[in-house]
Amino acid sequence: MPTAAEIYNAAFSDGLRPDPLLTVSQWADQYRMLSQTASAEPGRWRTDRTPYLREIMDCLSPSSGVEKVVFMKGAQVGGTEAGNNWIGYVIV
């Protein structure tokens, strides 16, 4: 059984490791879950279902050189969900 010091040291070194370089769309595909109450298709987010949002989300990624993103859209095209993906990416 590991000692408290070993557990602490392991957690500390894990915390020093840099986060993986993911774009917002990659993060959403890997971690975002849609609920049954908020989505017609609950379960894992799939950017492939809304490919037109991929570039927009990826331009919001820190690795992107884009400085300003303007998203003009109609109703019910996934803009709020793209924003939710970005917020989730930034928070985590």
Image (cartoon, rainbow, N blue to C red):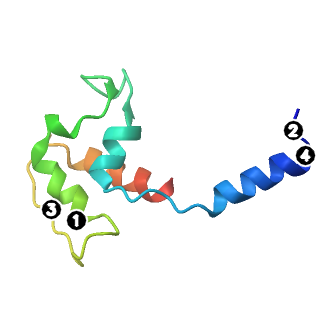
CB under 8 Å between callouts 4 and 2? Answer: no
- Looking at the picture, which amino acid does disc 3 mark? Phe
Instruction: Compare marks 4 and 3 and give the one earlier in the sequence.
Output: 4
Query: Which numbered disc covers residue 59?
Result: 1
Element on which disc 4 rests: helix
Marks 1 and 4 sit apart, C-alpha to C-alpha, by 43 Å
Q: Residue at x 23, y 59 (%)?
A: 58
Query: Which numbered disc covers residue 71?
Result: 3
User: Tag count in the figure?
Assistant: 4
Where does label 4 land, which residue? 4
Query: Which numbered disc covers residue 2?
Result: 2
**Residue 16 visible in the picture:** yes
Element on which disc 3 rests: loop
Quadrant of res 17: bottom right
For the residue carrying disc 4, how many other residues have a C-alpha within 10 Å: few (<14), some (14-19), or many (20+)?
Answer: few
Marks 1 and 2 sit apart, C-alpha to C-alpha, by 44 Å
Which percent across, then down, holds residue 51? 12, 44
Q: Quadrant of the N terminus?
A: top right
Marks 4 and 2 sit apart, C-alpha to C-alpha, by 7 Å
